[in-house]
Image (cartoon, grey):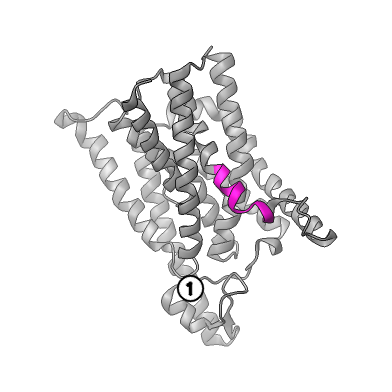
Amino acid sequence: MNPIELLKSAFLGLVEGITEWLPISSTGHMILVDEFMQLDVTAEFLNMFLVVIQLGAILAVCVLFFHELNPFSPSKGRAGRRATWALWGKIVLACIPAAAIGIPLDDFMEEHLYNGTVVALALIVYGIAFIAIEMWRKRSLARRVAAGDIAGAHPAGSHFAHRSAADDTADGTDFGTITRVEDLPVKTAFGIGCFQVLSLIPGTSRSGSTIIGGLLLGCTRSVASKFTFFLAIPVMFGASALKLAKYVVLDGGTFGANELAIMGVGCAVAFAVSLVAIKWLMAFVRKHTFIAFGVYRIVLGAIVLAYFLLGPALGIAGGMA
């Protein structure tokens, strides 16, 4: 086992753990990192690894929200267990659109869309979308307050002190009509799942597309983010199972000591970093907008686009089209 390859795997796990949950596109970042720091593995293994490493990240969600997602928790009464099963029903329902479109088109998208130009454009377009949506929400709330339609906003989470809507508009505190994941209507959950289809384009961000959907459909930032985390569980397990099956059955891939070590290190680091990233994001969105992420996406997208458009002429671009 080459320690350099293990360090590369650990770095990829770090990138995955941060970018999987922040709305800045984990797949886009992983593709870009691979452009400058390539693992010494087969192309088939790398394609599988860049997806399966997400299992480490999703385990962090299972750990952090275990009680909330566990319908068999002994501390939950009949009503609590029924509510948990209802939540899982919404999660599964919201996964159907992306699965129905993504599974049959997986090979096509991998062949035609996984390139620097697509990633850069997606980063920029959805960066602009985040900024536009946050500004629209702020103006919408201000109009409602001025018209006297609402007397105040209610931050997600009962442990937060009540604040006026004017204060929420001024400093970006979390607001929305759906303030608890448990209250998420079935129709809204399915609508968020439809937005998840957009994440099939690399650079869009699975969390970014579903958070945008949640915001447009009336969720607070906290609810949109949390439901995004929950949606990732079946999505990532399903995507990882599909990639593993293709690697073993179709590509004839095997797992030697080197491959197992790379997988283990990458997933372990992604898990540890995800624990921190998820906690940080949940605290951040209660008091801040997503505008900063929008700006980051636009700046990064512009840099990436310039690199892949101007790089060939300067003789510095790598292998990505």
Total of numbered circles in the picture? 1
Relative image position of residue 16 (x, y in whole percent)? 43, 41
* SS for callout 1: loop
What residue lies at 41% left-to-right and 31% top-to-bottom? 114
Relative image position of residue 80 (x, y in whole percent)? 78, 60
Q: Look at the picture and state if 51 lies above or below 303.
A: above
Q: Extreme top residue here?
A: 252
What residue lies at 38% left-to-right and 40% top-to-bottom? 29
Q: Look at the picture and state if 89 lies above or below 265.
A: below
Q: What stretch is highlighted in magenta?
A: 58-68
> In the image shown, does 166 or 321 lie closer to the viewer?
166
Relative image position of residue 273 (x, y in whole percent)? 44, 47
Residue 85 seen by the camera: yes
Q: Look at the picture and state if 143 lies above or below 245.
A: below
- Residue 63 is one of the magenta-drawn residues: yes
Residue type of the residue flagged with mark 1: Thr
What residue lies at 41% left-to-right and 49% top-to-bottom? 24
Relative image position of residue 195 (x, y in whole percent)? 57, 49
Q: Extreme left residue here?
A: 314
> In the image shown, does 283 or 146 lie closer to the viewer?
283
Q: Name the residue under label 1.
A: 173
Q: In which quarter of the image is the N terminus?
A: top left
> In the image shown, does 225 or 197 lie closer to the viewer?
225
- Residue 202 is one of the magenta-drawn residues: no
Quadrant in the rendering for residue 7: top left
Q: In which quarter of the image is the C terminus?
A: top left
Residue 20 seen by the camera: no
Query: What predominant SS class does the magenta segment belong to?
Result: helix
Q: Is residue 178 rendered to the left or right of residue 108?
A: right
Q: How crowded is mark 1: few (under 14 residues within 10 Å), some or many (20 or more)?
A: many
